[in-house]
Structure formats: C-alpha cells, structure tokens
Image (tube, rainbow, N blue to C red):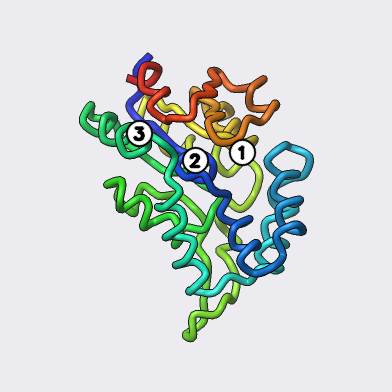
Amino acid sequence: MSFDVVCFDCDSTLSRVEGIDELARRQGSFEQVAAMTDAAMNGEMALEAVYGDRLGVIKPDQAAIDWLADLYIAEMVEGVAETVKTLQENGKLIHIISGGLRQAILPLAAVLGIPDERVHAVDVIFDEQGQYVDFARHSPLAVSGGKARICRRLRMHHSSLVMVGDGKTDLEAKLAGAYMIGFGGVVKRPLVQEQADLFLAETSLTAILPYVL
C-alpha cells in the first residue's frame, strides 16, 4: 500500500500526552476531566458532550497553552521525527488532524517541519490579557464526525489517504474512505484494536513505515 497523504492524530500518537488532561492536571481538575476524555475516546460519550465542558472547567490561558506546547515536544513519541522525515523524503503530504488545541500543537508541527496550514485542530480564543474566553465552536473537530469531514476535504484533492491514531475519533476517517492505522504504542483501546484496518502495538511510530510507503 502507498498513500499520497498521511494524517496523524496528535495526542497519544505524535506525543505521549493527552493535552487536555495535562492542562487539567496543571490546574487541579485532572480526575474530573480525565473521566470525560476517557468516555469520549472509548466511545461511551459523544465528543461534543464533553468538549466545551472540559474547557469550561480548565479555562486554559495563553501561559497554559505555551506550557502544553513545550510538553508536547518534550514527550514526543519514539520515532516521530524519523517517521515524518522519511515520509516527507518520499514525497508524502503530512497533515495533523486533532481534536486538541491548535495553538499548543503548532510548535510541535514546526519542529517536525509540518506547515501551519496542514495542522487541523481547534483554536482557543483569548482576550487581550491572554485569558481564556472560548474555543472555536464552529470547528468540525470539536464534534463527532469532524475527522471524517477533514479527511473528505483532503480526499477531494488526493486519491489515497491514511489516518494514524489511537482513539475512536480517528476511526471516523474510515467514513471518508481513508485507511485507518490504529497506533497502540502509547495507549491500546479495544475499540480501535477491533475496528482499525491495521493495529500496531509497537512503541515506535516507525512501525507504520512499511505499511504506508
């Protein structure tokens, strides 16, 4: 198999952390928020049911987002830089498609040489003092089915697309005709093991290379 476009989830795929949970831990509401995240990732609750609620609890300011951006980079999954570099050298277009917070993911993308316009995530809105106001409620990635919508958009221009990720929302790419590789190197979710086109449990992301080149 060979794909024109390789799309990656961010949390628990490119980086070992779940960003929203780490923001909650920093702010002191970890248990409450982690329970919501888990329910959404395991398919027990719709994403839209928890998305705004979690951010409403945490209210991450600009300083918190900058802190998370550094953490994403510090906790990069083994083999990520090598994987992205190899794919780019082979002419693959790399996109990040994440339900995470875009301003926190952009610095990681920059380290990997992925342009901002290929980072699809949810923008946070701050006031002039850098305090949390809201998030981009119109973003397709803040609701169920959003990753399928982004993949459909990409498939209008590219014939073959693969999505690599760890959670239920990554499986949605299959609805857009994408091939879905479940990455279990950080967390193994039974639903993803059952429904992914291919499931890899290796800790290094380089494990995907034989299947996407």
Q: Amino acid at mark 2?
A: Asp
Q: Amino acid at mark 1?
A: Thr
Q: Amino acid at mark 3?
A: His
The disc placed on residue 157 is 3
Image position of 29 (left or right of 106): right
User: In terms of secondary structure, where does tag 2 sit?
Assistant: loop
Does the CB distance between marks 1 and 2 fall below 8 Å? Answer: yes
**Residue 40: x and y, percent?**
71, 44
Label 1 to label 3: alpha-carbon separation: 22 Å
User: Dot 1: within a 10 Å radius of its alpha carbon, few (fewer than 14), some, or many (20 or more) residues?
Assistant: many
**In the foreground, 23 or 192:** 23
Residue 211's place in the image compared with 22, above or below, is above
**Residue 54: x and y, percent?**
69, 61
Residue drawn at (71%, 68%), measured in percent from left and top?
A: 57
Image position of 111 (left or right of 195): left
Q: Which residue is mark 2?
A: 9
Q: Quadrant of the C terminus?
A: top left
The disc placed on residue 169 is 1
Residue 136's place in the image compared with 182, above or below, is below
Label 3 to label 2: alpha-carbon separation: 20 Å
Q: Quadrant of residue 69?
A: bottom left
Residue 181's place in the image compared with 132, above or below, is above
Does the CB distance between marks 3 and 2 fall below 8 Å? Answer: no
Which is closer to the viewer, label 1 or label 2? 2
Q: Residue furthest top?
A: 1
Residue drawn at (56%, 54%), measured in percent from left and top?
A: 19
Q: Residue furthest left?
A: 89
Mark closer to the chain start, 1 or 3? 3
Residue drawn at (32%, 39%), measured in percent from left and top?
A: 81
Q: Residue furthest bottom?
A: 129
Q: Quadrant of residue 52?
A: bottom right
User: Dot 2: within a 10 Å radius of its alpha carbon, few (fewer than 14), some, or many (20 or more) residues?
Assistant: many
